[in-house]
Image: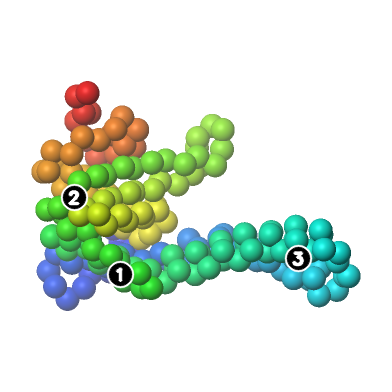
Protein backbone atom coordinates (compact mmCIF):
# COMPACT_ATOMS: atom_id res chain seq x y z
CA UNK A 1 0.00 0.00 0.00
CA UNK A 2 1.17 3.53 -0.74
CA UNK A 3 2.45 5.39 2.33
CA UNK A 4 0.22 8.34 1.41
CA UNK A 5 -3.01 6.30 1.33
CA UNK A 6 -5.00 6.35 4.54
CA UNK A 7 -6.46 3.08 5.79
CA UNK A 8 -10.08 3.22 6.93
CA UNK A 9 -11.75 1.09 9.60
CA UNK A 10 -12.90 -1.72 7.30
CA UNK A 11 -10.18 -4.22 6.38
CA UNK A 12 -9.07 -3.90 2.76
CA UNK A 13 -10.45 -0.36 2.45
CA UNK A 14 -8.15 2.52 1.56
CA UNK A 15 -8.85 6.22 1.19
CA UNK A 16 -6.99 8.32 -1.36
CA UNK A 17 -6.82 12.12 -1.53
CA UNK A 18 -5.20 14.79 -3.66
CA UNK A 19 -2.55 16.25 -1.31
CA UNK A 20 -2.32 20.03 -1.08
CA UNK A 21 1.31 19.89 -2.19
CA UNK A 22 0.21 18.25 -5.46
CA UNK A 23 -2.45 20.90 -6.11
CA UNK A 24 -0.37 24.05 -5.42
CA UNK A 25 0.77 24.30 -9.05
CA UNK A 26 -2.81 24.30 -10.34
CA UNK A 27 -3.86 26.92 -7.79
CA UNK A 28 -0.90 29.08 -8.84
CA UNK A 29 -1.75 28.72 -12.56
CA UNK A 30 -5.36 29.72 -11.87
CA UNK A 31 -4.22 32.73 -9.85
CA UNK A 32 -1.69 33.68 -12.56
CA UNK A 33 -4.60 34.09 -14.97
CA UNK A 34 -7.27 35.49 -12.67
CA UNK A 35 -5.26 38.06 -10.68
CA UNK A 36 -3.80 40.05 -13.60
CA UNK A 37 -7.15 40.01 -15.37
CA UNK A 38 -8.91 41.24 -12.23
CA UNK A 39 -6.30 43.96 -11.71
CA UNK A 40 -6.74 45.16 -15.30
CA UNK A 41 -10.51 45.25 -14.98
CA UNK A 42 -10.27 47.13 -11.67
CA UNK A 43 -7.66 49.70 -12.64
CA UNK A 44 -7.77 50.38 -16.39
CA UNK A 45 -10.71 51.57 -18.51
CA UNK A 46 -11.27 48.77 -20.99
CA UNK A 47 -13.24 48.90 -24.23
CA UNK A 48 -15.79 46.32 -25.34
CA UNK A 49 -13.43 44.26 -27.49
CA UNK A 50 -10.64 44.15 -24.91
CA UNK A 51 -13.20 43.49 -22.19
CA UNK A 52 -14.61 40.55 -24.13
CA UNK A 53 -11.15 39.08 -24.70
CA UNK A 54 -10.07 39.59 -21.08
CA UNK A 55 -13.42 38.29 -19.88
CA UNK A 56 -12.89 35.15 -21.96
CA UNK A 57 -9.49 34.60 -20.39
CA UNK A 58 -10.94 35.22 -16.92
CA UNK A 59 -13.68 32.67 -17.61
CA UNK A 60 -11.17 30.04 -18.75
CA UNK A 61 -8.99 30.54 -15.68
CA UNK A 62 -12.07 30.69 -13.45
CA UNK A 63 -13.29 27.31 -14.74
CA UNK A 64 -9.78 25.90 -14.24
CA UNK A 65 -9.76 27.24 -10.66
CA UNK A 66 -13.17 25.70 -9.97
CA UNK A 67 -12.08 22.33 -11.37
CA UNK A 68 -8.96 22.48 -9.18
CA UNK A 69 -11.02 23.17 -6.05
CA UNK A 70 -13.43 20.33 -6.92
CA UNK A 71 -10.58 17.87 -7.59
CA UNK A 72 -8.83 18.86 -4.37
CA UNK A 73 -12.06 18.28 -2.46
CA UNK A 74 -12.57 14.82 -3.95
CA UNK A 75 -11.39 11.65 -2.27
CA UNK A 76 -11.54 8.02 -3.33
CA UNK A 77 -12.46 5.10 -1.17
CA UNK A 78 -11.31 1.77 -2.57
CA UNK A 79 -12.52 -1.60 -1.33
CA UNK A 80 -12.17 -5.14 -2.64
CA UNK A 81 -15.47 -4.71 -4.51
CA UNK A 82 -15.59 -1.06 -5.62
CA UNK A 83 -14.08 2.37 -6.00
CA UNK A 84 -16.18 5.30 -4.74
CA UNK A 85 -15.65 9.03 -5.07
CA UNK A 86 -16.59 11.32 -2.22
CA UNK A 87 -16.91 15.06 -2.56
CA UNK A 88 -19.23 17.16 -4.71
CA UNK A 89 -19.73 14.25 -7.11
CA UNK A 90 -20.48 10.74 -5.87
CA UNK A 91 -19.66 7.97 -8.32
CA UNK A 92 -19.14 4.26 -7.82
CA UNK A 93 -17.25 1.85 -10.02
CA UNK A 94 -17.91 -1.77 -9.07
CA UNK A 95 -14.96 -3.95 -10.01
CA UNK A 96 -17.28 -6.80 -11.07
CA UNK A 97 -18.95 -4.45 -13.59
CA UNK A 98 -15.80 -2.79 -14.99
CA UNK A 99 -16.08 -2.62 -18.78
CA UNK A 100 -13.33 -0.14 -19.74
CA UNK A 101 -9.90 0.79 -18.47
CA UNK A 102 -7.54 3.25 -20.09
CA UNK A 103 -4.27 4.55 -18.66
CA UNK A 104 -2.85 7.54 -20.53
CA UNK A 105 0.41 9.42 -20.08
CA UNK A 106 0.52 13.14 -20.82
CA UNK A 107 4.01 14.54 -21.23
CA UNK A 108 4.88 18.12 -20.38
CA UNK A 109 8.25 17.93 -22.12
CA UNK A 110 9.40 16.78 -25.53
CA UNK A 111 11.75 14.23 -23.98
CA UNK A 112 8.76 12.73 -22.12
CA UNK A 113 10.60 12.83 -18.79
CA UNK A 114 7.94 14.89 -17.04
CA UNK A 115 4.20 14.56 -17.09
CA UNK A 116 1.29 12.82 -15.44
CA UNK A 117 -0.91 9.79 -15.93
CA UNK A 118 -4.67 9.64 -16.04
CA UNK A 119 -6.67 6.51 -15.29
CA UNK A 120 -10.08 6.30 -16.91
CA UNK A 121 -12.50 3.65 -15.68
CA UNK A 122 -16.03 2.86 -16.81
CA UNK A 123 -18.63 0.50 -15.39
CA UNK A 124 -22.37 0.36 -16.06
CA UNK A 125 -22.35 3.79 -17.72
CA UNK A 126 -20.42 5.45 -14.87
CA UNK A 127 -17.13 7.04 -15.95
CA UNK A 128 -14.38 8.08 -13.58
CA UNK A 129 -11.06 9.81 -14.32
CA UNK A 130 -8.25 9.91 -11.78
CA UNK A 131 -4.92 11.64 -12.27
CA UNK A 132 -1.62 10.44 -10.91
CA UNK A 133 -1.31 13.20 -8.33
CA UNK A 134 -3.72 11.38 -6.03
CA UNK A 135 -2.08 9.61 -3.11
CA UNK A 136 -1.84 5.89 -3.77
CA UNK A 137 -2.40 6.19 -7.53
CA UNK A 138 -0.26 3.11 -8.24
CA UNK A 139 -2.36 1.07 -5.81
CA UNK A 140 -5.60 2.15 -7.51
CA UNK A 141 -4.17 1.35 -10.96
CA UNK A 142 -2.98 -2.07 -9.78
CA UNK A 143 -6.44 -2.92 -8.41
CA UNK A 144 -8.13 -1.67 -11.59
CA UNK A 145 -5.76 -3.72 -13.77
CA UNK A 146 -6.52 -6.82 -11.68
CA UNK A 147 -10.24 -6.22 -12.23
CA UNK A 148 -9.71 -5.63 -15.96
CA UNK A 149 -7.76 -8.89 -16.24
CA UNK A 150 -10.41 -10.80 -14.29
CA UNK A 151 -13.12 -9.42 -16.59
CA UNK A 152 -11.09 -10.12 -19.75
CA UNK A 153 -11.11 -6.48 -20.83
CA UNK A 154 -8.91 -5.78 -23.84
CA UNK A 155 -6.47 -2.94 -23.16
CA UNK A 156 -4.94 -0.78 -25.87
CA UNK A 157 -1.19 -0.78 -26.46
CA UNK A 158 -0.66 2.59 -24.77
CA UNK A 159 -2.43 1.39 -21.62
CA UNK A 160 -0.34 -1.80 -21.53
CA UNK A 161 2.87 0.23 -21.99
CA UNK A 162 1.85 2.67 -19.25
CA UNK A 163 1.01 -0.20 -16.90
CA UNK A 164 4.45 -1.67 -17.55
CA UNK A 165 6.01 1.72 -16.78
CA UNK A 166 4.37 1.40 -13.35
CA UNK A 167 5.72 -2.14 -12.96
CA UNK A 168 2.38 -3.84 -13.71
CA UNK A 169 2.57 -6.65 -16.28
CA UNK A 170 -0.48 -7.19 -18.53
CA UNK A 171 -1.04 -9.10 -21.72
CA UNK A 172 -1.50 -7.05 -24.88
CA UNK A 173 -4.91 -7.55 -26.52
CA UNK A 174 -5.18 -9.74 -29.59
CA UNK A 175 -6.85 -7.69 -32.31
Could you say which quadrant of the image residue 3 lies in? Answer: bottom left
Query: Where 87 falls versus 133 (above or below)?
Result: below
Rate crowding at label 2 as few (under 14), some (14 to 19) or many (20 or more) other CA atoms within 10 Å.
Answer: many
Circles 2 and 3: CB distance less than 8 Å?
no
Q: Residue furthest right?
A: 45
Q: In which quarter of the image is the C terminus?
A: top left
> Residue, x 34% and y 33% (percent of image)?
158
Query: Where 12 falls versus 170 (above or below)?
Result: below
Rate crowding at label 1 as few (under 14), some (14 to 19) or many (20 or more) other CA atoms within 10 Å.
Answer: few
| Chain-order first, disc 2 or disc 3 | 3
> Residue, x 35% and y 60% (percent of image)?
135
| Viewer-side label of 2, 3 | 2
Residue 55: mark: none
Q: What element carries label 3?
A: helix
Let me know if residue 27 appears in the view.
no
Pick the residue in front: 166 or 146: 146
| Chain-order first, disc 3 or disc 1 | 3
- Spatial CA distance of label 2 from label 3 is 45 Å
Could you say which quadrant of the image residue 172 lies in? Answer: top left
Q: Is mark 1 on a helix, strand or loop?
A: loop
**Residue identified by numbered label 3:** 36
> Residue, x 33% and y 42% (percent of image)?
103
Q: Residue furthest front?
A: 48
| Chain-order first, disc 2 or disc 1 | 1
**Residue identified by numbered label 2:** 98
**Residue identified by numbered label 1:** 90
Let me know if residue 2 appears in the view.
yes
Circles 2 and 1: CB distance less than 8 Å?
no
Pick the residue in front: 39 or 12: 39
Left or right, 104 with respect to 91, comes to right
Query: Where 69 falls versus 118 (above or below)?
Result: below
- Spatial CA distance of label 3 from label 1 is 35 Å
Amino acid sequence: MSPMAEVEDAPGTTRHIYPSSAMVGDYMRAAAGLVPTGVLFATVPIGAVAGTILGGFAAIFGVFALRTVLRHGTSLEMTDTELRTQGVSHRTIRWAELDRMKLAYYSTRRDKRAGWMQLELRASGVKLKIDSRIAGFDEVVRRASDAAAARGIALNEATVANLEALGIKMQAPEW
